[in-house]
Image (cartoon, grey):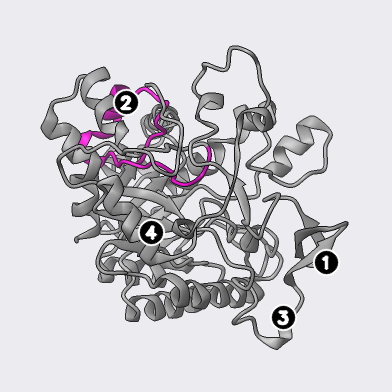
Amino acid sequence: MEYTPYSPDMAYSDFGHPVFDCDFHLYEGPDAFTRYLPSAYKGLVRLAEIDGRTKMIIRGKVSDYIPNPTFQVVAEPGSAAEYFSGRNTEGKSYREIVRPMRAIPEFTDRDARLALMDRMHIQSICNFPTLASLIEVNFMDDPVGTQVLVHAFNEWLFDEWGFNYQNRIFTTPIMNLADAEGAVKELEWALERGAKTVLVRPGPVAGFRGPKSPFLPDSDPFWAAVQDAGIPVMLHASDSGYQKFANEWSGADREMRPFEQDVFATVSQSHRPIMDTVFSAVCHGMLSRFPGVRLGSIENGGVWMNRVVEDLVDGYGKMPHLFAEHPLDVLKRSLYVAPYWEEPLQPLIDTVGLDHILFNSDWPHPEGLADPVEYAVFARDEVGLPEGDVARIMGGNMHELMGV
């Protein structure tokens, strides 16, 4: 698939069918973590000037997770596509390829975003934070504090974007399952404000006796509430805490930096969080205890699905008595996957089925698509899918999943 460079006045593709992009992003404002932060937590998460540059400070430590956390200058949408396409024949670094630009209102304002969606011929989007994953990974020893910080951020998110803006922009409040009672309270708060989906980080959550899976029976009250609400839960790629494993192999001590590429960390860890998350949801039985729960894997790619299927089938073949039901039945019922644009599509269709594949562009992040709807042309003309199948991937599946 060829990629289209971004330009402010570009002519966007028109597929001619309703498009629902399940992965757009917002850029947070400077007070996103502090506007509603209780006084007892003041200073734990803040911005500060360090050597003439604004940096995010987490528990007194400078974070370089995002080089410019004010987002005044950002990477141009789609400008890293060449880096991930296999066409970087000159071996340029990520920084050499990515082009900077001044931020525009479409990154931070919901009305400007709606106007952009009209120009892009996109009917609806799921809208995710960019910087918010710093909360959970840095407070794994503090389950109470994690939920306080998450709620403060969700309050800001609702102020600025709402959770259902004109039935087209579905911004995702974060749910943290460190404590089930707190998670249910947060879910109810979000649902009262119109949330049609929520975000759960792929990975363990803080626990009172150490990290734990969010799918263990002690989290069942939350998943029961999700099932009753009939909304999907989005497992969007995040800082899931797996950098520590790459550090151990590399003899390093660094935080995850999504805009700096470490080949070992990328190859060894990029798919582990979502794979382990899916393994836990199946093997710990949550998806069987609550068969109405639907999970969307967003910005995790799809090439890992074959490995998950192989490992689950192998485990079931050896120990079927330890599974509540066949794991493939669980996956085909409960899991929806959004592949990366540069991945082969047909193998994923063969694995999870056409009806469980979602379209995502990751706009406006640099590794995504500058012109999201051009993916439809790729699926139709290069993969050879019939028009009706392409329409399902580009929007039909997501409209059904969201119930809108």
Task: Give whichever of discs 1 and 3 has the lower sequence position.
Answer: 3
Q: Can you identify the residue that label 1 sits on?
A: 60
* Element under disc 3: helix
Q: Quadrant of residue 10?
A: top left
Q: Can you identify the residue that label 2 sits on?
A: 345
Q: Can you identify the residue that label 3 sits on?
A: 41
Dot 3 amino acid type: Tyr
* Element under disc 1: loop
Q: Residue at x 69, y 65 (%)?
A: 139
* Label 3 vs label 4, nearer the camera: 4
Dot 1 amino acid type: Gly
Dot 2 amino acid type: Leu
Horizontal side of residue 191 vs 230, given as left or right: right
Q: Residue at x 44, y 44 (%)?
A: 8
- The stretch drawn in magenta includes residue 342: yes
Q: Residues within 10 Å of mark 3 (few under 14, many from 20)?
A: few
